[in-house]
Amino acid sequence: MWLAKLRSVVRAVLGRTRMKRDMDSELQFHLDARSDDLVAAGLDRTAATRRARQELGDPLRCKEQGREARGLRLVDQLSADVRYGMRWLRRSPAFAAAAVVSIAVGIGGDAARVPWYRAWRLARQLKPGVSRDAAEQELDASFQRFSALLPSDWPRDRRLILLDGSRGRPTLQNRFGRPLVVLSGLAMAVLLLVCLNVANLMLARTAARRRELYMRIALGASRGRIVGQLLVETLLIAVTGGALGLILARWAAQGLASIAVPAPASALLEVTMDLRVLAFATILSVATGLVCGLSPAFSARRTNLVAALSIEGRQVTGGRLLGRKLLVAAQIALSFTLLVGAGLFARTLANLRDLDFGFETGHLLLLTLDPTLSGYERPQLRVFYGEVTERVATLPGVRSASLAVMPLLGRNSWGSGLTLDTGVRDDRPGPERKAVDAGYFSTVGTPIVAGRDFTKADVASGRKVAVVNEAFARQYFGGQALGRRIGPGGPQGSADFTVVGIARDGKYAEVRENTAPFWYVPYEQLEQLGQLTLHVRTTGDPETVAADVRQAITAIATQFHGRAARNLRTKRVECDEIWQFVGAKRKYALAAKRLYYGDNLDVVRRPRPVLPS
Amino acid sequence: MNPRKLRSVRSLLQGTLDLLILKAISLGPLHGYAVLLRIQQTSQDQLRIQQGSLYPALYRLECQGLIASEWDESENPSQGEVLPAHRGWTSTAQGRSELLAAAVECDSMVLAAAPEDV
């Protein structure tokens, strides 16, 4: 039964013209046959034709009922609503554009938050409602199950404990927590503003259209039809805005991720669309539109239509006016807040752009390699790393290449305390250090201000050497650091590294850090070798060089190990570009638009001339 | 003006009309106008169908899969002239079984409503 119905509707929708022709000719046949009969009964042809028409009734109505009988009513109404809505939106492009852009910006802004949202989830994986103890128990249970599978010479008494991440450990929570809160707040403010904006637009629009709606109700349109029509119009706007928002979101999320999380850390945070976030933003915008767009349809029941039609436009009820005033006030307040925030943000960015990084930004490519994960042994590693550096340095488009234990601006930390030749020992994490290759300083562009760079001669068997930065030299040796001896802290720490050079101060782990003592050691003199980052200075676009570099490394790895290297991550660092923040500009434009449109669309509500009643 | 009451009356009428149409075409294909005539004829002019409501009813029945139609360019035997193409309606198997079920129901209702001595 329903199958036949469906078939009928589908056929009716697809074969519109054919069905219309069939209906026409069937009715025509009926009229002909009936008038023939009437003529046979004694009427003349003209009278018979007229009589036949009278008996059949209005052919239009007949046809309409016919269409209705075929289940086409919904389709008809919907298509009429869509056509009407399109026409209406075309007639008021200012409104349509404002609403569509609002929704698009709201959705785009929200999606831009996604990488931060991810980071937050990483940092705080305890579900609300799960106690720390319960989580610890569960984790420890799975850890014990895991260690049962390990060889018998593994220690059995290990236990897994959970530490409160919000205290102590300077990991993801601290790193991403604050900017996340700020960004989330911003995105929420934007979303709220979008809702207010859509609400205001809809109210302004429906106020202007109220007469039209009342007219339709007076002409017999059911509330369902009115609601349906407004629904269709709102959805039209929402769908267009949503589509635009998706495009905007892609663009904004990528821009924001590379800006807010500079350097390789953002490689950890994949920028993808989170459908749930998008859906949330969309639903919120649409719901706002619906509530505001539909209010006149519901209030129409209480309205005396005649009075409404004759005096509407002059009369504004108090409650509604107050509501609108509040709405506008909230909009302006939020806009100003965002405007000030965006101004400060832009100022910060301008400051950051003038920042001295202590190395040459731009045309720098970073690749982090961890061949130990593919099963390389220690002696093999040295040869492998040497080969990689050599081969990459000769690639076209590459000026120089150098290895270091941690990537620049990677938010890594290697502080191991400090021992000085004066006998001073400090076991606190202390000054950060980094293990680098010979040629590192020239590759990243950090000048050596005194003494010398590391050389190929600084090998494991040679004298242990170190390079310190200016701040280090100033703080511990009053600037005269060359020839002094330093070393890591702790019980085994001894000052057996001789300072051979002083490098200029700079930014090491992240952009916002203050200048602090820092020292370098040659990685050749490290006992342990693991993950290293290849710093490549390119002459052209790092992105195009990256592919060649990857290919070269894969080739070497295959040759060494018989299979391709896995765990190869690349991230380009273009610090010059990082700070050109699109978001700030966008928020400026947004706030300006809001201030402009929010009030401009109101002017449609002007008094009408008095109708004779 | 309670719309609920109105609707029930209309649905009752429509139900009857559907049944009458099914009955009329159960003997063979008929075009719309002939359905009208057949109903008047079999009810000895007791039932007068609004001509305007016949076609929506036909389309509705077709939509429900109870009747089917085909186009036919046949000669009208009584007048010997070629008529314009017209649509002949026939009941489907489903329509026939619906009609049968409705007829049985109708009979039992008439029996139930009839006075004892009939």
Image (cartoon, helix red, strand yellow):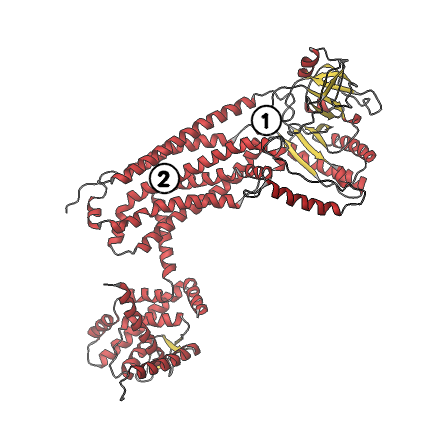
Q: Which mark is residue A433?
A: none
Placement of the N terminus of chain A among the 4 image quadrants: bottom left
Name the residue rendered at 65%, 44% in the picture. A139
Name the residue rendered at 68%, 37% in the picture. A569
Q: Is residue B97 above or below residue A123?
A: below
The disc labelled 1 sits on which kind of residue? Asp
Q: Is residue A443 left or right of residue A329?
A: right
Instruction: Output the chain of dot 1.
Output: A
Residue A20, by quadrant, is bottom left
Whichever of callouts 1 and 2 sits on the residue coming sooner in the sequence is 2
The lab-note entry on whether marks 1 and 2 share a chain reads yes
Disc 1 crowd, CA 10 A, few/some/many (<14, 14-19, 20+): few
> Would you name the residue on which mark 1 appears?
A576
Between A318 and A193, the one lying in front of the other is A318
Q: CA distance from mark 1 to mark 2?
A: 38 Å
Between A18 and B111, the one lying in front of the other is B111
Find the residue positioned furthest to the bottom.
Answer: B117
Image location (x, y in percent) of residue A44: 19, 77
Total number of numbered discs in the rendering: 2
SS class, disc 1:
helix
- Regarding residue A59, the answer to whether it shows in the image is no
Between A476 and A24, the one lying in front of the other is A476
Q: Are marks 1 and 2 in contact (CB under 8 Å)?
A: no
Instruction: Output the chain of dot 2.
Output: A
Name the residue rendered at 35%, 57% in the picture. A77
Q: Is residue A308 left or right of residue A325?
A: left
Image location (x, y in percent) of residue A586: 47, 32
The disc labelled 2 sits on which kind of residue? Ala
